[in-house]
Every structure is written in structure tokens, then in C-alpha cells.
Amino acid sequence: MDINTKRLSLKFKIGPTYIILLDRNEPEFAHLVNKKLSPGKLFKDLYNCGVNLLPVEEDAISANIV
């Protein structure tokens, strides 16, 4: 699965119980790339790196998105 944001293009491989972040060379992602992780763990770790792929209602309000 590919996700394109305004800042990043992310590629993932999805398995039955895991997700893998692919093809990232940035040092902030080094501990995540090419590792089988649970989706929750990966998205939480990406959030800690500044990439929020699980926005909530308040995020839309602060970004001025209707």
C-alpha cells in the first residue's frame, strides 16, 4: 500500500498480522524500516517521528479542514 502526503510518500507491505514500512532512508525511520510490526506499533512510532497517519477530529479543526 502506498500513502502520499504533502510531505512524504510512504510504502507499506501488509501481512495478516503485521505491517512493514519500506524504502525509507531517513535516520528518524531507521528503527522502523523493513521490520514486521503490528499496525498500532508502527503508526504510534511514526507519530513519535512526526508522521501522523491516524488523525482525530481535533486535527482536522486545527488544520482548518472541513
Image (cartoon, grey):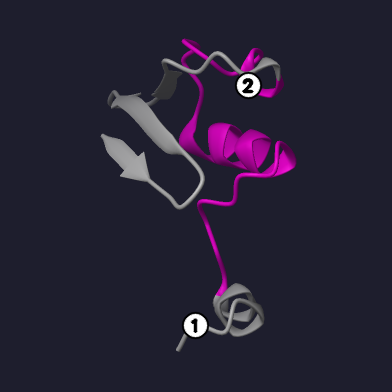
What amino acid is found at the position of numbered circle 1 in the picture? Ile
Quadrant in which the N terminus appears: top left
Judging from the image, what secondary structure is the residue with disc 2 in? helix
Disc 1 residue crowd, few under 14, some 14–19, many 20+, Cα 10 Å? few
Residue 47 inside the magenta-drawn segment:
yes
In the displayed structure, would residue 43 be above or below residue 64?
A: above
Specify the label residue 14 is tagged with.
none
Name the spot of residue 9 as percent of width and height, x first. 40, 36
Q: CA distance from mark 2 to mark 1?
A: 28 Å
Q: Residue at x 36, y 45 (%)?
A: 4
How many marks the image carries: the answer is 2
Which residue, as the protein is rendered here, is positioned at the far bottom? 66
Q: Which residue is mark 1?
A: 65
**Foreground pick, 23 / 44:** 23
Which quadrant holds residue 27? top right
Q: Residue at x 62, y 37 (%)?
A: 46
Name the spot of residue 62 as percent of width and height, x first. 66, 80
Residue 48 inside the magenta-drawn segment:
yes
Q: Residue at x 50, y 29 (%)?
A: 38
In the displayed structure, would residue 59 be above or below residue 8?
A: below
Judging from the image, what secondary structure is the residue with disc 1 in? loop
Indicate left or right for 9 with 59 as reference. Answer: left
Quadrant in which the C terminus appears: bottom left
**Foreground pick, 47 / 36:** 47
Name the spot of residue 11 as percent of width and height, x first. 35, 28
**Foreground pick, 29 / 41:** 29
Q: Residue at x 66, y 14 (%)?
A: 31
In the displayed structure, would residue 56 be above or below residue 52?
A: below
Disc 2 residue crowd, few under 14, some 14–19, many 20+, Cα 10 Å? some
Which contiguous range is marked in magenta?
28-56
Name the spot of residue 48 as percent of width and height, x first. 73, 40
Specify the label residue 29 is tagged with.
2
